Image: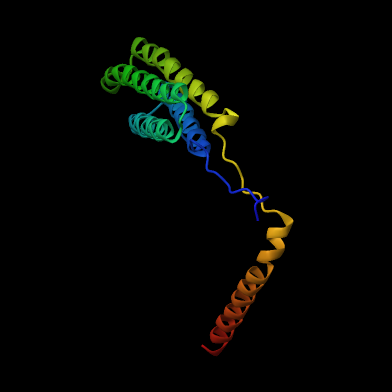
Amino acid sequence: DPSSVAGKPGVIDLNLLQRSSDAIHSSCQQLIAPNTSRDQFIKSATEIAKSTSSLCNACRVASTNTSNPNSKRNFMQSAKDVANATAALIKEIRPLDDTNSQHVNENCRQATRPLLEAVENLLSFASSPEFAPVPARISPKARTAQEPITSYGKSIIDASSSMIMSAKSLA
């Protein structure tokens, strides 16, 4: 039916961005906490690296999924900002691995700010409605035309379920 509209995926996976952002935020908090153990410290640094890598890959994919040259550029710039902020944080993490001095910890705390800011800027940009998915819309006429197919499918599932239940009772 011509009045139905096909769905369209979003340019970028906002759920992935949000999960990565949450992981980066919690890992940064853990990283700069005063009583962080060496194992927690390593785990947090690893999680930051994995999550920023996911964000950068998502930006790369989004830049190929959009036809707007400004959006392509913004996604790639966001990826660079996240990567550069992560590299700066890693430079501060290395001395922290050897010694847990207050001075080095404060440098690490300062280095988390640009990363968190870059992640927030990316989330803000990617949350624009122009990048959001468009859900499919099925007209009432098309829904009526599909009714025989969907009802037969439901009947097949019900019959299969009954058959499985019968087989379980025999076993």
Q: Is residue 51 left or right of residue 10?
A: left
Residue sitting at the far bottom:
170
Q: Nearer the viewer, residue 10 or 100?
A: 10
What residue is at 57 percent from the left and 79 percent from the top? 160
What residue is at 43 percent from the left and 15 percent from the top? 114
Q: Position of residue 42 (x, y in %)?
A: 33, 31
Q: What's the coloring here?
A: rainbow
Residue sitting at the far front:
2
Q: Position of residue 8 (x, y in %)?
A: 55, 44
The image quadrant where one finds the N terminus is bottom right
What residue is at 61 percent from the left and 72 percent from the top? 153
Residue 132, above or below 120: below
Quarter location, residue 115: top left
Q: Is residue 44 left or right of residue 127?
A: left
Residue sitting at the far right:
140
Q: Position of residue 41 (x, y in %)?
A: 36, 28
Residue 107, above or below 3: above
